[in-house]
Image (cartoon, coloured by chain):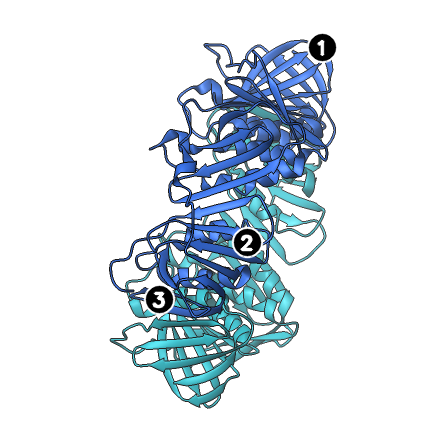
Chain colours: A cyan, B blue
Amino acid sequence: MHFYIDSKELTEGVLSVIKALPVRTTMPILEGIYLEATNEGVKLKCSDLMLQKECLLPATIEEEGFAIVPGKLFSEIVRKMPESIAEVTLNGKSLEISCGRAKSSIQCVEATEEFPEMRFTGDTFTVKMDHSDCRDMINTTVFATAQDDSKPILTGVLMELGEDITIVATDAFQFAKRSMPLKNPVPERDVVIPGKSMVEISRMMDETEADVELTFTKTHVCVNIKHSRLVARLLDGDYIKYKNILPKDHTTRVMIDKAELMESIDRAQLMAREGNNNIVMKFHDNKLTISANSFVGRVNEEIDVQINGEDIDIAFNPRFCINVLKNIPDEKIYMDFTTSISPCVIRPAKTEGYYYLIVPVRIYSNF
Amino acid sequence: MHFYIDSKELTEGVLSVIKALPVRTTMPILEGIYLEATNEGVKLKCSDLMLQKECLLPATIEEEGFAIVPGKLFSEIVRKMPESIAEVTLNGKSLEISCGRAKSSIQCVEATEEFPEMRFTGDTFTVKMDHSDCRDMINTTVFATAQDDSKPILTGVLMELGEDITIVATDAFQFAKRSMPLKNPVPERDVVIPGKSMVEISRMMDETEADVELTFTKTHVCVNIKHSRLVARLLDGDYIKYKNILPKDHTTRVMIDKAELMESIDRAQLMAREGNNNIVMKFHDNKLTISANSFVGRVNEEIDVQINGEDIDIAFNPRFCINVLKNIPDEKIYMDFTTSISPCVIRPAKTEGYYYLIVPVRIYSNF
């Protein structure tokens, strides 16, 4: 293998594909970047078996071939190269990189097996979206995915496709749902995409200003942007039947200024985290009183709100409140309650298509 | 205690004094901020017994008094307050803080003893410096202080005062010395100031544009800037007789472009850190070859240099080279060598008053 490539383009390509490098793995080959010189250009690829990122870079190929190089080290080397044309040569087991005065050679990963390739085959269908809608829908929901593996399906994000696109994520304490009409309606279909892959799809949206296409097979999703390509495996199994747990009704609806609420919760959580990590919200007479208590001290603040329905006292983990509130675009929000032990629905007062739900904390004392 | 204070000024004061809060301590009282309302204003104070920071803030005092509040929590509370006038009231063991809608109360630290006060008494003498000279001299030397306590005196910085001011720091692997004439010559005197206190003195320089005064007693140093005051204990004991270890002569002097050298070392250390953490420098025929080897690969680069004297091969820990080079202002540097196992002197080619020394690594192979 022997080729010449612009060092800046190589750096960008490497920094893009290493997003799929696994943090921990028992397969040494996955710590590598697969590098291939073909007549189309230089191909880079990383995979953690669930997510694969590739790119194809323009290059002057003198000799075709391939190598697997240690991903982290290679990315640091190319990042520190001067801006110039880099010459890359495979010499036995070592890859020589020469760029201006910078001259390194690195030992390739000993491959006892082929570098894994995610096959993207079978019938496909395609969803077309505006790139910023796509990024925005992912970023405002993916935080609610489960971070541990106790229910693996909840580490993914449900995507319901049809006339609309609906994205759902929940870890059973917080629940996020975004919907919007699709430009090109597709046959009804539910898919579950791992949260990590969704974050990476969202990041790819920064690389374009155009519409993007998400192409699905039965088992995978694929996104192509310019020279980059992402393939992610879908999660097997059915997502939870979330519609059954959404409250059908409410007895209290409160309209609140989002910024005031966030600031008060932010202050209250300073105390809450030293204690049982709860904040108590009491809605009475168009006033919300937010309080938190612990052995280090207490916070007690009042906000003017607009209450429709019965007064209610309820307690939350402040982190879930903040997670939700910071994803809402409007200045005013609605909080809908039924009882102090049922989930609370939070929505923007005006903007459609956002639906959040947080589960309260049961408090046994009379506050 | 009861007073009114501008929340922004309170925040700035707190963020300034908590720099002296100890990271770890066995004395709970030191985790607190000492807060006192006097007829002069509100006094804040933190101490780790080696370093004390205080400030005096303008306030409307309704009732004098004092309290010790948990430092970290209090700083977070004031930082999250809206910009307004805060009312602070001591109510038994709890300090009530009210600022706009924000209302907290925090439990004071139970003081079983008096908050430590560093006494700054006895004969004094004062060194006057430009604030940016002071910051610059500290920042370009303090990195070389020892980070562990095996030789406690080396965790400090030597300050030699007289006609000039000379600052020296070393951990026995790297050595840094800066000198400049003093505006007001003082009687000859050597003091050793802890590295952490020096860093804090340097930070204080950002708060002023004027000349600063460092006032010394036999045991302490004190710096006053606007409302802030720092008192630091000097280290006991004599600093090492460093003049004996400075090379008297050299057999090779090399002039090198600093940026080229730093870039090459930066790339070479990628390989070095995977191996024995050495880079090898060979000076021959007005060329410097920098190389590093490890099982993951190697770097081998050439730089044009100007060699006066004998050719030499020598090896260094790349971290020490980078530490020194990034503190040198000039584009060109001199490196002076005697043998490949003696310290190497590094200086700017033009600017006076900088003197660095790094100890080479002994290599047993013939490179």
Task: Respond whether the residues carrying marks 1 and 3 are from the same subunit.
Answer: no
The amino acid marked with disc number 3 is Glu
Provide residue B198's location: percent of width, then percent of height: 53, 32
User: Is there one chain holding both mark 2 and mark 3?
Assistant: yes
Foreground mark, 2 or 3, reads 3
Q: Residues within 10 Å of mark 2 (few under 14, many from 20)?
A: many
Residue A287 in the figure: left or right of residue A202: right
Q: Is residue A269 visible?
A: no
Of residue A209 and residue A264, the one placed in the foreground of this image is A209
Q: Which residue, given by chain and number where applicable, does mark 3 sit on?
A: A31
Percent of width and height locating residue B17: 59, 26
Can you tell which mark lies on residue A176? 2
The residue type indicated by label 2 comes to Ala
* Type of amino acid under label 1: Asn
Around disc 1, counting alpha carbons within 10 Å, would you say few (fewer than 14), some (14 to 19), or many (20 or more)? Answer: few
Residue A188, given in percent of the width and then of the height, sits at: 53, 73
Crowding at mark 3 (Cα within 10 Å: few <14, some 14-19, many 20+): many
Residue A20 picture quarter: bottom left
> Between tags 1 and 3, which lies in front?
1
**Hey, which quadrant is residue A226 in on the image?**
bottom right
Please give the name of the residue rendered at 46% of the width and 90% of the height, measured from the top-left corner.
Answer: A39
Chain that bears disc 3: A
Residue A227: quarter of image: bottom right
Q: Earlier in the sequence, mark 2 or mark 3?
A: 3
Find disc 1 in the rendering and name its residue: B39
Question: Dot 2 lies on which element?
Answer: strand
